[in-house]
Amino acid sequence: MTETGRENVPSRARRRFPGISSRAYEHPADRSALVALRKLSGFDTVFKALSGLLPERSLRLLYLSDSVRVSDAQFAHLHDMLRDACYILDLEKVPSMYVTQDPKPNAMCIGLDEPIIVVTTGLVELLDEEEMRAVVGHEVGHALSGHSVYRTVLLFLTGLALKVAWIPLGNVAVMAIVTALREWFRKSELSADRAGLLVGQDLQASMRGLMKLAGGHHLHEMNVDAFLAQAEEYEESGDLRDSVLKILNVLPRSHPFTTVRAAELKKWSESRDYQRIMDGHYPRRSEDKDASVTDSFRESASHYADTVRGSKDPLMKLVGDIAGGAGDLGGKLFEKFTGASGGRPAAGEDGKSDSTGTA
């Protein structure tokens, strides 16, 4: 494939998705978090200002001058994967891709006008071909969804927050937007994982890649089922205090925890939605302008309601109980944090008679 065409497409025994809309694979939480982000006070103003100020040309020159640009002549196998991923997801223009020297395994898709994909040497050395194919598809999914714009803003604001941290209250407004961006980006990673599976069409390779990100290249020492069992234990274990700690642990992260990503992806791979896409039934980009915003909101709301109902996390179960009218918030919080058998003493338990004579 050329930079804009379809020439020399690698021959792959993989299903292609002509005209596929990113709506086909986007996680409901991704869309709803982005809507919430855009409603954040001051975000539109900051975003519009940064769109004109961010040094995107400088960013491109930086990678051009100090990284290796993927092409037919350099990292050719990655170039083939990139063209293949764009062909499968029908992304018309192939993004520029760079390999940068960094022992930490990582990849990102950034850029305002045109997306740039960057992968580290640590990631290239860690993953095998099929695992890497899923990662490349993951980044192309980011590009197709338009995530690179907000990712670039997040990177800039994170650096800005460090520079203004010494100014009284100067960091508060910036960190509010950074926190909201991170919440959205964690959800967008779940969408991109799905795109990676659509490109690689090999669930085991996707699972292996996530395990390696968590535990390194000692794949012979790891097991997919045991890894997924960790995700289940993470969700179920502990009490309400652990649920709060989970939230605090994830707040500074741009990515969800790897076990959670693996569990989410496996669940989606077994869903009717995934099978319909593989059968060729999916929303097209030509239909995006007619897509109902109300339906997207309803789908996101339904997803969160199902998540709360089905979650085994103590905090989510508590929220579900309260939403279902099973008790008052204060009493249940008291019980969970203190271990008391009841949130309040029953009538007459304090040694005084109940004047009403009712419970």
Image (cartoon, rainbow, N blue to C red):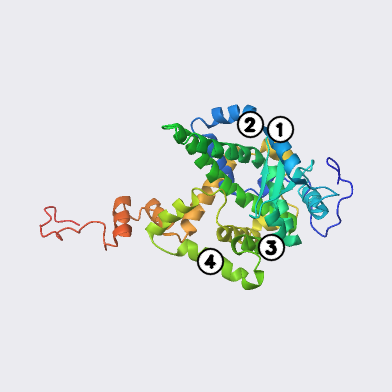
- Measured Cα–Cα span from mark 2 to mark 1: 9 Å
Q: Which residue is mark 3?
A: 203
Q: Which residue is mark 2?
A: 54
Instruction: Determine whether the residue tagged by mark 2 lies in a helix, strand or loop.
Output: loop
Residue 290 vertical placement versus 120 (above, below)? above
Q: Amino acid at mark 1?
A: Arg
In primary-sequence order, the first of circles 4 and 2 is 2
In primary-sequence order, the first of circles 4 and 1 is 1
Task: Tell which tag, 4 or 3, sits nearer the viewer.
Answer: 4
Q: Which residue is mark 1?
A: 57
Residue 73 vertical placement versus 203 (above, below)? above
Residue located at (89% from left, 49% from top): 8
Measuring from the top left, give residue 29's x and y in whole percent.
56, 47
- Measured Cα–Cα span from mark 4 to mark 3: 18 Å
Instruction: Determine whether the residue tagged by mark 3 lies in a helix, strand or loop.
Output: helix
Farthest residue toward the right? 8
In primary-sequence order, the first of circles 1 and 3 is 1
- Measured Cα–Cα span from mark 1 to mark 3: 37 Å
Estimate how packed mark 1 is, as few (under 14), some (14 to 19) or many (20 or more) residues with alpha carbons within 10 Å.
Answer: few
- Measured Cα–Cα span from mark 4 to mark 2: 40 Å
Q: Amino acid at mark 3?
A: Leu
Residue located at (44% from left, 51% from top): 248
Instruction: Determine whether the residue tagged by mark 1 lies in a helix, strand or loop.
Output: helix
Q: Which residue is mark 4?
A: 230
Q: Nearer the viewer, residue 301 or 48?
A: 48
Estimate how packed mark 2 is, as few (under 14), some (14 to 19) or many (20 or more) residues with alpha carbons within 10 Å.
Answer: some
In primary-sequence order, the first of circles 4 and 3 is 3
Q: Amino acid at mark 2?
A: Leu
Residue located at (69% from left, 39% from top): 288
Q: Marks 1 and 4: in contact by CB < 8 Å? A: no
Q: Amino acid at mark 4?
A: Gln
Q: Is residue 276 visible?
A: no
